[in-house]
Image: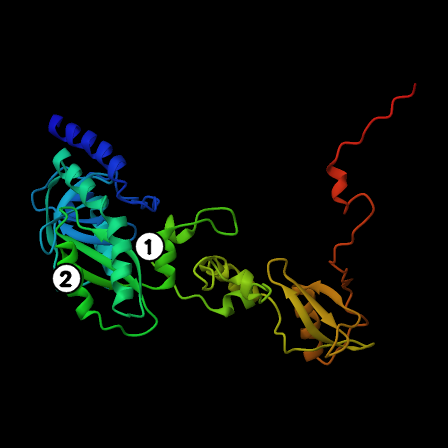
Amino acid sequence: MKKYTVANDNNQLGAAATKRNSAHMLPVSDWLNDLPENTQLTDLIEVQFKNTRKGYFHNSQHLPLEKGVTVVVEANPGQDLGEVVLTGKLVELQMKKNNIDSSRYEVRQVVRIATEQDFERARQAHAREQETMIKARQLAKSLGLEMKIGDVEYQGDGTKAIFYYIADGRVDFRQLIKVYADTFRIRVEMKQIGARQEAGRIGGTGPCGRELCCSTWMMNFSSVGTGAARIQNISPNPQKLAGMCAKLKCCLNYEVPVYEDAVKLLPSRHIELETKDATWYFFSSDPLAKTVTYSSDPQHAGNLTTLSAARAHEIIAMNRRGEKPDTLEGTRAVSTEIGYQTGHGDVTRFDKKKKHHRR
């Protein structure tokens, strides 16, 4: 137990010095962590490296590992340094979720809990990443390749580096790999990433004022379509819908299931309401408020009337029985435009008024 305590202290000091996870990813919620039989179900662990890169390894030595411990694992070639983020039964579920077959996937071994020597070696390797990235961009430009080196990640022992690049089309970088190997004297691996992955690795602040989701807690990227904005009645403004990566914001997907369930309670927009005084056509809806607005003109906004979804379904049922109500019995829609009133829209209202003292 004493040996583990010392290693854990070194782990905390070394992790703070190396800043292994430069994007400050939020921890994974391991809800089976406090069960004593959890680690006995499997010896698999999930290890996170720089940013979103992860791997699965066997703890065949049965080391006392838990979330947050930095370990040395086998790599190809050499060894790498990473942080344990998941242990026990949830690792198998995570592999199944990511469509990873343990029988075909090459699962390497955990070598040891990281020591101070391992941290020092990793610090020296990571200190070269910025300089290597700048030089790598210059070499790629000199060869006339249509690509951009977004990030460089050195392995924990400094014998290998992963060059993350962005390219619109296919790039023949066989000559580039030879130049990189001769220049940096390391083993080179090229990995293509997209605009979303680049934004997650670089980081930044979104229009909401918080750090980007892709650089704090998101591990996997889901496709985002314009249908997500349409179902939420968001204005189709490209400048407001695009994120820092110039793609549709990932947060557009967050509330889509709630809106999809709410829309099911609303009447179809293709159904017209018949009353004794007029025919009413669908104009707009508010799924969360469960209200529908109808217009007396099929092409323009005329006599807009807002009523609840329950009342709309009631009128539809009456029309199917051949009955027509006298009126919709709704509430007239009120314009939502903000008017600038005297004393409310003037920015000088924030200024303190000078007090005039009578002599």
Residue at numbered disc 1: 219
CA–CA distance between discs 2 and 1? 20 Å
The earlier-in-sequence mark between 2 and 1 is: 2
x and y, in percent, of residue 181 in the image: 14, 59
Is disc 2 in contact with disc 1, using a CB cutoff of under 8 Å? no
x and y, in percent, of residue 211 in the image: 44, 47
Residue at 28% over, 60% down:
138
Q: Is residue 324 left or right of residue 172?
A: right
Q: Say which element carries label 1.
A: loop
Q: Amino acid at mark 1?
A: Met
Residue sitting at the far right: 359
In the rendered view, would you say 264 is above or below 273?
Answer: above
Residue at numbered disc 2: 105
Tell me if mark 1 has few (under 14), some (14-19) or many (20+) residues whose alpha carbon lies within 10 angstroms of its own: some
Residue at 27% over, 35% down:
16
Residue sitting at the far bottom: 322
Q: Is residue 118 left or right of residue 191?
A: left
Front-lying residue, 162 or 327: 162
Image quadrant containing the N terminus: top left
Q: Quadrant of residue 136?
A: bottom left
Residue sitting at the far front: 142
Residue at 76% over, 66% down:
305
Q: Quadrant of residue 10?
A: top left
Res 7 label: none
Q: Say which element carries label 2.
A: loop
Q: Amino acid at mark 2?
A: Tyr
